[in-house]
């Protein structure tokens, strides 16, 4: 199986939506742009946000199996994907790419 590199490439927030819809929370997302993780055998890397992992997992598992070319040529690198977490208030975009066959 492949190792899959996961890189947080963009983090944004929507304060207007937070004010309108979200209850005040003390702790939000700890991910920072440029942060990287390595998934081995399609497993969740240590320190990965569980909610983000839920969004990334199907793509990471496919890349780890050597599959790719999602949506018929969507990505320039067919062994990669750009996936965002499911937080509608402060989404993070993650670049996933297969690293090596083992």
Image (cartoon, grey):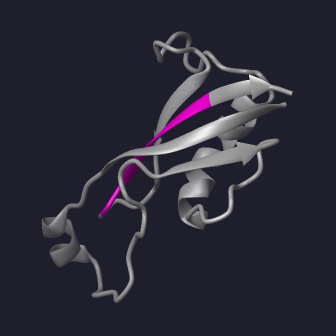
Q: Position of residue 45 (x, y in %)?
A: 68, 56
Q: Position of residue 37 (x, y in %)?
A: 59, 50
The answer to which quarter of the image holds residue 22 is bottom left
Q: What secondary structure characterizes most of the magenta part?
A: strand
Q: In this view, does 41 lie above or below 30?
A: above
Q: Nearer the viewer, residue 89 or 80?
A: 80
Q: What residue do we see at 35% from left, 51% from top? A: 33
Residue placed furthest toward the left:
16
Q: What residue do we see at 66% from left, 20% from top? A: 68
Q: In this view, does 93 lie above or below 31?
A: above
Question: The N terminus appears in which quarter of the rendering?
Answer: top right
**Is residue 102 covered in magenta?**
no
Question: The C terminus appears in which quarter of the rendering?
Answer: top right
The region drawn magenta spans 90-97
Q: Nearer the viewer, residue 65 or 99?
A: 99
Left/right placement of residue 89 relative to residue 71 reads left
Q: What residue do we see at 60% from left, 38% from top? A: 5
Q: Where is residue 42 in the image (x, y as percent from the top left)?
A: 77, 43
Q: Where is residue 57 in the image (x, y as percent from the top left)?
A: 66, 47
């Amino acid at each position: 199986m492949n190792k899959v590199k996961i890189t947080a490439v963009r983090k944004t927030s929507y304060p207007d939506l937070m004010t309108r819809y979200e209850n005040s929370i003390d702790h939000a997302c700890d991910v920072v742009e440029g942060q990287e993780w390595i998934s081995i055998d399609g497993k969740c890397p240590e320190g990965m946000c569980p909610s983000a992992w839920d969004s990334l997992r199907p793509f990471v598992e496919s890349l780890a199996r050597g599959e790719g070319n999602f949506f018929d040529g969507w990505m320039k690198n067919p062994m990669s994907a750009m996936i965002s977490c499911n937080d509608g208030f402060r989404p993070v975009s993650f670049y996933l790419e297969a690293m090596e066959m083992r």
